[in-house]
Image (cartoon, grey):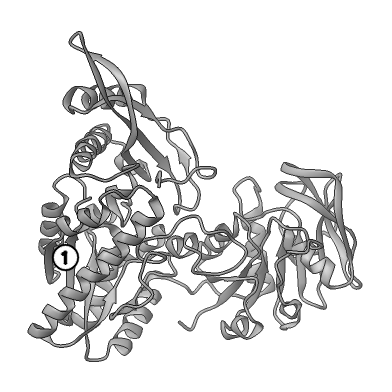
Amino acid sequence: MDTSSIVILDFGSQYTQLIARRIREQNVFSVVLPCTAPIEQVRAQKPLGIILSGGPCSVYDADAPPADPAVLELGVPVLGICYGLQFIAHHLGGKVRSAEKREYGHAEVSVVDAESPLFAGIPGPLTAWMSHGDEAIELPPGFHLTAKTSNAVAGIANPERQVWAVQFHPEVHHTKQGTALLRNFLFNICGAKPDWTPELFIQSTVAAIREKVGEGHAICALSGGVDSSVAAVLVHRAIGDRLTCVFVDNGVLRKNEFFKVQENLRNKLGLNLVAVDASGRFLSKLAGVTDPEKKRKIIGNEFIAVFDDEAQRITKEAGQVDWLVQGTLYPDVIESSSVKGPSQTIKSHHNVGGLPETMKLKLIEPLRDLFKDEVRRIGRDLGMPADILERQPFPGPGLAVRILGEITPERVALLQEADDIVVSEIKRAGLYQQIWQSFAVLLPVKSVGVMGDQRTYAYTCAVRAVNSEDGMTADWVPLPYEVLKTISNRIVNEIVGINRVVYDITSKPPGTIEWE
């Protein structure tokens, strides 16, 4: 894509992906690279600007991220955020030390340099979000103070070097003028243009897929969710009937999902769809497995084995199949740490970290750089039906990561019924499209209950509902009391085998959206 781009170097901040989102909201493309990326890789992106993220380390730690200071000499504007400011100060001749008074949370920032292009049009003082234990006590030569709090340096700049930095986090909602500050960096300082649009993405992606695949054939791993459906429509637009979509029943789908998805994808999207009932082979591989990472990897490996089998069959009928299309998203890549850097691996995704190292098919992942809301925008511009695009996210490993402990056909059946009750009641209350994700989890915990004067000893079901912009962070939803009451009553009365319902009120972080 021939568009403006901003490179974000990740020093391990929990907010790094939020920086990328805030930039994309301005229709400017952004890409996250690990701070350890070679300078040649940074140059290859042809960035109009570079942002250095925050991070948990101190610049003087022995294990401080080993970024190349040459990123400050590329001749394009640089914005340091939090740790990024300290990195700039430390490597350009200033001094950083452990702060006598650390700042976490809300802080009042006074703008010292009203002429700074970074603070143009932003009335002070700013309400900003701080999260640092170190501070810059001496500025590098040529730098001057642009903002401060009562305790510490909050902003520095050297316009001759095209380097700016702030100690607070403009990317979070808690910093009220943060978006205005980022806009100043993008448009006033970097000269970026808001030219990254869904229409341009569709055109460039379709062209790239057409060139990559040539006259070859591809199969698409379809789940029926938003991501794989949009990926399939994009690839279908590029190569037409040379795409065969494969929908696999892995034994851990939702209730009646195998039949509903086939109806949607064939009738509403007009895709060439092959449905494969592989539930038996998946469940046999998962038998006795309780470790969540092993579950994900087993499912990833078995999916590829199924697709290899289907590719061979399709090859005999339609010609050689070399490509596998997947609806992998940016959060999948990030959480699986495909972008290697100081950030920790949260969990492997079955279509990223769970793929086998050697597989016969080559991957096409047209949505790999997108967040969920961006995928929905793309889908709308493709003219896809709203009832497909507005589906809540469903994990690739399906109910396998919502059944804690061993996966058995009996436990799958219990969760399918409970999950169906949760989703149907939330839809009946008119809340489905207002919530990012809502579902049931089957816990490996049994407790004593009483029904009809008889003792029961049955499983516990957890109900989970969260709101999120992109799945990277999430807040639990305070579902109305009557909705929770109805869900609980229906589960314990209609499902033999579950006698207790609990509600998960954990946000992300510290928890994850899924339980495994």
Give amino acid for label 1: Leu
Q: Residue furthest left?
A: 317
Q: Is residue 112 visible?
A: yes
Query: Left of 282 or right of it: where is 442?
Result: right
Q: Is residue 390 visible?
A: no
The residue indicated by pointer 1 is: 269
Residue 448 against residue 91 in the figure, above or below: above
Residue drawn at x 26%, y 35% is 422
Query: Left of 57 or right of it: where is 202?
Result: left
The 10 Å Cα crowd at callout 1, few under 14, some 14 to 19, many 20 or more, is some
Q: Position of residue 489 (x, y in %)?
A: 24, 21
- Seen from the viewer's position, the closer of residues 73 and 76 is 73
Residue 329 against residue 509 in the figure, above or below: below
Q: Residue furthest front?
A: 288
Residue drawn at x 50%, y 43% is 511
Q: Position of residue 506 (x, y in %)?
A: 48, 36
Res. 324 image quadrant: bottom left
Residue 354 against residue 98 in the figure, above or below: below
